[in-house]
Image (cartoon, rainbow, N blue to C red):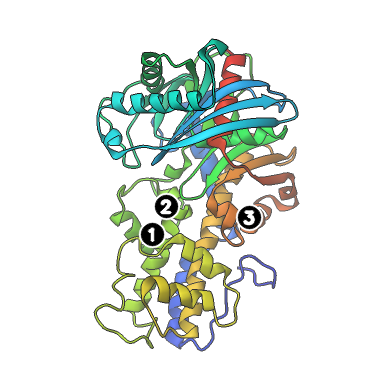
Amino acid sequence: MATTALDPFKLIDIENATEEQALVLEDITKQFELSTQKITEIVQHYVGEMHKGLEKNNHTLAMIPSFVIGKPTGKEVGTVLAMDLGGTNFRVCLMEFKENTEINIKQQKYRVPDEFKTGKVNMLFDYIADCVDKFLQEIGYEKKNGILDLGFTFSFPVQQTAIDKGTLLHWTKGFEAEGAVGEDIVKLMQGSLNRRQIPARVVALINDTVGTLLAHAYKRHTDALIGVILGTGTNGAYFEKISHIKKLGTFQSKSEEMIVNMEWGAFDLERKILPITMFDNKLDRESLNPRAQLFEKLISGMYLGEIVRNIILYLIDRDLLFKCVHFDYSTFKEINKQWAFDTVWVSTIEADQSSNLDDTKIVFEKYLNIYSTSLTDRQIVKKVCQIVGIRSARLGAAGLAGVISHRGAIKTGCSIGIDGSLFEFYPNFEQRLKSTFHEVFGSDAENIHLELTRDGSGVGAALAAILAVKHA
């Protein structure tokens, strides 16, 4: 890797490392390094997998048609509802779109009780409908004002057959509501709304990456191509020519493009191209979904801390780290726990520029009860965090470069809307994306524009509803 002073790939120098420490760290670093040639090979393989996913269903890179057609122009007007269900909280919003991309938003969050996550599905959707009813009453919306079009962000695996039809494949995130798998989510939701005589019609079902892309395009980015989540999880969606989505068969539309949800977390499940280390294998083996979501496990914030923890434990076991720490049974009790090393701490340690790495010292003392670490210990840990963080960004860039290459967008230019804590907060993440683009595309990488795009699940869902009605 390059070592110029301003290079976002520059690794920390470790003072007073022993010969064995230096050799082992050099070996680990090489396992995580991705040369320009390797990145290029990953990009090419990604493009090939995109083609396969566009041709047929049930491919590793799913390439799911969203049936969202057309691009927002920034001139959309109207009042619509948006709902977002994807975790502990459920959110409902009333959005009034005005000219010049002005939006008036009224919204409320409601906690989803555990009993509704695991009970009958009708109980879950009836509860959501009750929340919508309560919300509309609180903001003073009267039924005589008419039926509201509704966009529903449903962040669970769904196989869509239309913009307003989607079959749940399986639950995730602690949800296990009975009677939903294999059923049309829109039909279930609409049934609950109708039973309570709520003036709302579900016209669009999307996931958060599709919403991110729509929210980004709405800001009058006529060159908007990709929406991506780079946070706790990761996924991407992009505008594809309908004629390229061979598995749609005879589907016809006046629009030339449709958003495709790539579900890119599963890329290279076959392990043909991604370099997997023993630390990644340990994480995968001990995860809740072994042999699944491989790409996501190398990139997303949910997993980076655990990879770092695995490396730290390896170094401890080799007697190469924390040798000055007084050892008893409880010394490494906390760090021995799975998921004990939060990715927030990885970010904190990478950002630590103090000469003594004081913030790194605080992380180990305050959260992991490891005291008396040496400066060399802390420098080693920072280097470990750097190599894991660098690989995450470079792989994310490889996936994005694959989409750009597939669409032939590098010469004409394109913009990417990105949401998520890694992109927004992780040190050097954006710079590492851009530097990797330059390795792949040369000076043409200047034609790629990145922008933080928040609230795709709200604004994006509402825009999907507007587009659905427009193109009905």
Q: Which residue lies at the image location 73% right of the left edge and 40% below the top edge?
A: 413
Mark 2 closeness class: few <14, some 14–19, many ≥20 residues within 10 Å: many
69, 204: nearer the viewer: 204
SS type, badge 3: helix
Disc number at residue 297? 2
Q: Are marks 1 and 3 in contact (CB under 8 Å)?
A: no
In the displayed structure, would residue 244 be above or below residue 275?
above
Disc 3 from disc 2: Cα separation: 19 Å
Disc 3 target residue: 430
In percent of width and height, residue 8 lies at 64, 65
Q: Are marks 2 and 1 in contact (CB under 8 Å)?
A: yes
SS type, badge 1: helix
Location of residue 9 by image quarter: bottom right
Residue 82 falls left or right of residue 321: right
Q: Which residue lies at the image location 53% right of the left edge and 16% below the top edge?
A: 142
Disc 1 from disc 3: Cα separation: 23 Å
Disc 1 target residue: 280
Q: Which amino acid type is shown beneath numbered disc 2?
A: Lys
Q: Earlier in the sequence, mark 2 or mark 1?
A: 1
SS type, badge 2: helix
